[in-house]
Structure formats: C-alpha cells, structure tokens
C-alpha cells in the first residue's frame, strides 16, 4: 500500500464518520443511524495491508466514538477484529465478486455492533436495548452489505482518476538485435 492509498483511506474514513454524524435524513426516515465503517473495514481488509487496516480501525473507531455516546475506544476493537479475520483469510475469498463482498459486508456490519454492545455491557455503560434495537441491527447490517461493493467501485474510480496508468506495450522487442554503424 502506497502513501496515496493510505491518505485516501483516512480521508474517506473521516468523511464517512462526518456524513454519519451530520446527515440525519436516513435516521429520520428509518429510525436508524447509518454505520458504514464496518463495510469500509471490509474493503480495507481485502485491498490493504495490516497497517492500513489498523489505521482505519483506530482512526475510524476514535472518530465514531467521539461523535457518539460510546466511551472513547469502544468501537476500535470490533472494527479491527472484524477486519483482521477477513484479512487473514483473504487468499480464500473471492474478493472481486460483488456477492462475496456483500456477504462479508453483511457479516461484519452485523458482528461489529454486537461486539461493541458486549463491550459496553462489560464496562457498565448501560446502553439502551429494546425490541427496536433488533430493527436497528437489521437495517445497519443490510446497509453495510449494500455499501461494501460500492466502496470497491468508489476506490477503483479514485485510483483510475488520480493514479498513474501503466505504460502500454511497446513495439520494440527486447530480444531484437539492432545493427548500428556505417
């Protein structure tokens, strides 16, 4: 992973948390706060190295906790664990297939809030849990599954626009001998 990709990931992580905290239209419509960090962690786990995964999990988790009612640092561990499990098995995953990306996004978007809830219960934070929490968990999981393939398309488009394109094949063959002289 080069510096450009790392900076792009961190900027997008910041923008994701900002959008989640700022725009309330989806929350007003469904009653659920949109959480796109687990789907971004899935993208990072499949396309980046361990340093990129750690930076997105720590930076995104701290930003998310700073704008939510969570104690600072609660979201970092579930994001990192979800991403590291995917990253360890990424050789066996069909990472370019949209349905595989959706399944991974669904699983991670479902697991991260549950692990965060277990951590909150263990630190005596007294989270609000009720029947409506099941609806919120389902919508968050489905939206994470829907957004995961979009991250792959968004970052591919960014790379296509801002990265150097590889040089095309030359007509010169390296095994050809050129005779020079007079």
Image: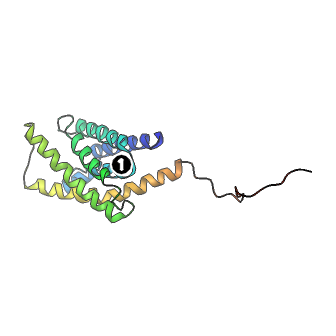
From the viewer's perspective, is 165 left or right of 150?
A: right
Q: Position of residue 19 (x, y in %)?
A: 32, 45
Q: Quadrant of the N terminus?
A: top left
User: Which quadrant of the view contains residue 171?
Assistant: bottom right
Whether residue 129 is visible here, answered yes or no, is yes
User: Which quadrant of the view contains residue 63?
Assistant: top left
Q: Which is nearer the eye, 124 or 2?
A: 2
Q: Which is nearer the eye, 140 or 22?
A: 140
Check disc 1 and report its element: helix, strand or loop.
Answer: helix
Q: From the viewer's perspective, is residue 133 above or below residue 127?
A: below
User: Which quadrant of the view contains residue 150?
Assistant: bottom left
Q: From the viewer's perspective, is residue 118 above or below residue 172?
A: above
Q: Position of residue 159 (x, y in %)?
A: 49, 50
Q: Residue at x 27, y 52 (%)?
A: 25
Q: From the viewer's perspective, is residue 149 above or below residue 24?
A: below
- Bin the neighbour count of mark 1 within 10 Å (Cα to Cα): few under 14, some 14-19, many 20 and up: many
Q: Which residue is mark 1?
A: 44
The type of colouring in the image is: rainbow
Whether residue 29 is visible here, answered yes or no, is no
Q: Residue at x 46, y 39 (%)?
A: 3
Q: Residue at x 18, y 58 (%)?
A: 138
Q: Residue at x 29, y 43 (%)?
A: 22
From the viewer's perspective, is 79 left or right of 15?
A: left
Q: Position of residue 51 (x, y in %)?
A: 36, 40
């Amino acid at each position: 992973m080069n510096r450009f990709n790392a900076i792009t990931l961190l900027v997008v992580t910041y923008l994701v948390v900002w959008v989640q905290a700022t725009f309330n239209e989806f929350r007003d419509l469904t009653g659920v706060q949109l959480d796109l960090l687990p789907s971004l962690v899935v993208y990072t786990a499949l396309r980046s190295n361990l340093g990129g995964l750690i930076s997105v999990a720590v930076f995104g988790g701290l930003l998310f906790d700073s704008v939510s009612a969570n104690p600072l640092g609660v979201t970092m561990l579930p994001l990192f664990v979800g991403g590291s499990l995917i990253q360890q098995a990424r050789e066996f995953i069909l990472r370019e297939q949209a349905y595989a990306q959706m399944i991974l996004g669904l699983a991670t978007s479902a697991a991260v809030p549950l692990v965060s809830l277990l951590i909150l219960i263990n630190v005596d934070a007294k989270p609000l849990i009720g029947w409506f929490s099941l609806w919120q968990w389902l919508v968050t999981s489905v939206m994470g599954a829907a957004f995961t393939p979009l991250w792959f398309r968004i970052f591919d488009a960014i790379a296509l626009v801002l990265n150097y394109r590889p040089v095309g094949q030359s007509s010169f063959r390296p095994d050809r001998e050129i005779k020079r002289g007079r």
